[in-house]
Amino acid sequence: MAVAQRAVEDNYLAYTDTTRVLVDEALLVERHAPTIFAVPYHHHASVEANFLIDCEMEYSFSGKPVRIPENRLTIFWGAVPHCVTSVTGTGQIVNVYVSLSQLLSWKLPQRFVSDLIAGHVICSREPDPIDTLIFPRWAEEFKRNDADLRKILAGEAEMRIRRLAAGDWECLYRGAGTAADIDAGSAKIGVVEEMLRYIVDNYASSSIGVSDMAAHVQLSESYATTLFRKVTGISLKEHITRTRLSHAQMMLSTTDKKILAIAMDSGFGSLSAFYEAFQARMHQTPGAFRREARS
């Protein structure tokens, strides 16, 4: 499956990858030789787990380099813009994509889930020898397109991620968000996931707000905001801001666009709003971030 293609030259807002948005499947499993992305960045509304065999690679998350080691399970929330910038070795990668609603239904430890929602990249501290057996097997068995077998795969993936969440893990990259308590038991997780997808698809419009998302999921504004905070631990407005900042960071580190243009392309509506949001969360100016990212 190819990542979303650029519609217009230099249009970084067209990289939503709808091929990794899971609707009818509990998970998606792929195996291939990792390569540098054909387009600068992409993002998708699903949780992504990576397992590298006989190779290592480097991602860029919103302009920040993150080295992914071999034989250690890595997992992150795909809504953060990311791309592969380098690959070392000639091995394989197994990608497992899980919908957010599926992951939340597993009722994993609060800190683990909230760190994922905050945009952190989580990695096991030590290799687990069983992973080199089970991840390739999942990829081969997923190809069979057998409904019963895929249910088994989903159960095995849950147990593996549950083991990671309960064990010794570290953050390779800390996103712009902060950890918050998550109510993973909400009966409306699917509705919140649809709001998250809506934000990924529409963050660049400065006019989107609570009323738009509430109308999209056919809920009242008050109930939509309450539900979103209950499930994710943060407000709708804050999540929109975080998403816009992720894309602004990406453009600051990879393009020569003027900061005003980046502010507008990221959906902030004004330069002052962009500076206020950026400095409050990143604790530096956009210009200082750009210089640091390119040094």
Image: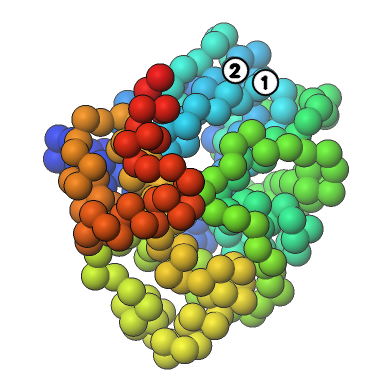
Q: Residue at x 60, y 55 (%)?
A: 178
Q: Residue at x 40, y 51 (%)?
A: 278
First in sequence: mark 1 vs mark 2: 2
Task: Please identify the residue farthest to the left as the structure is shown.
Answer: 8
Residue 21 visible from this viewpoint: no
Relative placement, left or right, of 75 versus 163 is left
The quadrant where residue 164 appears: top right
Q: Is residue 71 above or below residue 160?
A: above
For the residues labelled 1 and 2, say whether their Cβ atoms are less than 8 Å apart: yes
Q: Position of residue 73 (x, y in %)?
A: 70, 33
Q: Is residue 204 above or below residue 235?
A: above
Q: Residue at x 42, y 27 (%)?
A: 292
- Total of numbered circles in the picture? 2
Answer few, some or many: residues within 10 Å of disc 1's Cα (few below 14, many 20 plus, some between 14 and 19): many
Identify which amino acid the numbered label 1 is placed on. Answer: Glu
Q: Quadrant of the C terminus?
A: top left
Q: Nearer the viewer, residue 289 or 231?
A: 289
Relative placement, left or right, of 17 versus 91 is left
Relative placement, left or right, of 29 versus 170 is left
The disc label shown at residue 265, or none: none
The quadrant where residue 74 appears: top right
Distance from the alpha carbon under mark 1 to that under mark 2: 5 Å
Q: Which residue is mark 2?
A: 56
Q: Position of residue 93 (x, y in %)?
A: 58, 26
Q: Residue at x 51, y 72 (%)?
A: 235
Q: Which color scheme is applied?
A: rainbow
Q: Quadrant of the N terminus?
A: top left
Give the SS element for disc 2. Answer: strand
Give the SS element for disc 1. Answer: loop
Q: Which residue is mark 1?
A: 70
